[in-house]
Amino acid sequence: MGRRARTRRATTGVALLAALMTLSLAAGCTSSGDDGRGPGREPGERPSQSRAAEGSVLAVKIDNARSARPHTGLDSADIVYVEQVEGGLSRLMAVYATKLPPVIGPVRSARESDLELLRQFDRPTLAFSGAQRRLLPLIDEEPVNAQPPGKASDAYYRGTSTPAPHNLYLRPARLIPSAPGADALTTGFRYGTAPSGGTPETSLTVRYPAARFTFTWSESRDRWLVSMDGSPTVTTDGARLAPATVVVQYVKVRESDFHDSLGNTTPYTETVGEGRAEVLRDGKVFDADWKRADATDGTEFTAGNGMPVAFAEGQVWVVFAPS
């Protein structure tokens, strides 16, 4: 897969202040521009832009507030990125290349740092509910096939089991005709035999100020079972989310120039640069270094001896943790 393939990592906790907890609960329910219900608008379609870019991955912004769970179609994603958002909460970006489920959701709004993350793909299709007004022109300028509800209304629908804004769902086949295949995953990840060494690990927890992810090794399934905020994470059809590889990638998380409707500053997750990481696979944790020289590059993970760290075949979760 050249300079891009796949990855996984788990991480340790991040210190938090109790005051952020109060802000975070509110932030999870309100976000500027979400679903077109806030002050944001949908980006205008460019004359040359078709609904789907041929052979591109589908990236979907997924709501991860407690009231948005369980998710639908998340177990079909090739990669799930976890990022911190306003108030110390989390949001997901699911990337689909080898399989498209019938429905994905609930869908929520985009963030500025999503654009840097998505530049590693060849004009990806981005499904999202909306964005802050000042961010939308930046999305229009990106090599991204943006497809919010205002541009592809027949691809979205409102569910009835949860209230808005946690009930917007996507029918992905109405955005892209078929899954483009693994070659579209230009992430820099490598797959194959586990590296030598590693430390046996049964469970690892990553903490944000108002969110918690725990990955527990299942010997019988040969996978890492996901729990969020202390509860087992399942999809709407009852499937337990269980990636083959988890990557905890330590990155710089700084303040952006954007805020949500409550005045909470939107964090910006820097995914270009270098740092350390932990890769969870096969019941072990492997220390690694990550490097992404440019936004158009994938991310390389190497061991202390400079050799690439290969991931196990299957779904990869990448958790961006403050360094």
Image (cartoon, rainbow, N blue to C red):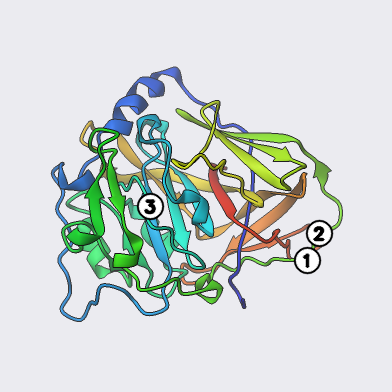
Q: Position of residue 151 (x, y in %)?
A: 18, 63
Q: Amino acid at mark 3?
A: Ile
Q: Is residue 199 above or below residue 48?
A: above
N-terminal label among 3 and 2: 3
Q: Quadrant of residue 102?
A: bottom left
Q: Amino acid at mark 1?
A: Met
In which quadrant will I find the N terminus?
Answer: bottom right
Q: How far, Cα to Cα, is label 3 from label 1?
A: 36 Å
N-terminal label among 2 and 1: 2
Q: Quadrant of residue 52?
A: bottom left
Disc 2 + disc 1, Cβ < 8 Å? yes
Find disc 3 in the rendering and name its residue.
Answer: 104
Q: Position of residue 7 (x, y in %)?
A: 62, 58
Q: Which numbered disc covers residue 307?
A: 1
Q: Position of residue 159 (x, y in %)?
A: 26, 42
Q: Is residue 260 above or below residue 154?
A: above
In which quadrant will I find the C terminus?
Answer: top right
Q: How far, Cα to Cα, is label 3 from label 2?
A: 34 Å
What residue is shown at x 29% (from left), y 33% (from top)? 162
Q: Residues within 10 Å of mark 1 (few under 14, many from 20)?
A: few
Q: Amino acid at mark 2?
A: Pro
- Front disc: 3 or 2: 3
Find disc 2 in the rendering and name its residue.
Answer: 195
